[in-house]
Image: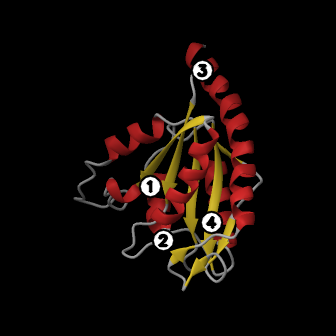
Amino acid sequence: MTKLNIGIVLGSTREGRLSPQVGNWVKELADQRGDANYTIIDIADYKLPLLGEAGADASGAAAWSEAIAAQDGFVFIAQEYNHSITGSLKNALDYLRAEWNDKAAGIVSYGSVGGARAAEHLRGILGELSVADVRVHPALSLFTDFENGAELKAAPVQEASVNQMLDQVIPWATALKSVRLKTVNA
């Protein structure tokens, strides 16, 4: 069986964002496992306008669709802004439907309370998109896992948490891939 494709989705497009640091850290840990093909997917690269915005250039939507469709599962890097996920992540999720269906996801969040509220909001959205999110949820604190709130210096326990999350994402992604294949062959 070929290796799974797991996309690490950076959930912010803001200037000065920390998600590239977190995503690269997760990818480094994940690549050490050798159990899947891990790819950073930065929603900022697709420049998706607000969904349904009149006269907007949505030319990046096709590439976004292809990138997501090619994945068997995801790790969402979710930062907490105003007790929820970013508007750019919500917009990017809303752009697609079938491309998300029957896939697994883990969430790595960060914020003043570890991004816990953003993760909980994301779980509800993922459920509506038929994405099965796993229980283990690394939650990084801006106060203890980032130096001066700007440079990722994750506590050692966080590394173990990422691996435990991936220990759940991989079997779920494998199982759901068989569901997708069964649907295609039906």
Q: Which residue is mark 3?
A: 181
Of the residues tagged 3 and 4, which is closer to the observer? 4
Q: Is residue 34 left or right of residue 70?
A: right
User: Cα distance, mark 1 to mark 3?
Assistant: 25 Å
Q: Amino acid at mark 3?
A: Leu
Residue 129 in view of the camera = no
User: Cα distance, mark 1 to mark 4?
Assistant: 17 Å
Disc on the earlier residue, 2 or 3: 2
| Element under disc 2 | loop
Q: Amino acid at mark 2?
A: Leu
Q: Which residue is mark 4?
A: 109
Q: Amino acid at mark 4?
A: Ser
Where on the picture, by quarter, is residue 100?
top right
Return the residue nearer the eye: 56 or 141.
141
Residue 18: assigned label: 2
Q: Which residue is mark 1?
A: 92
Disc on the earlier residue, 1 or 3: 1
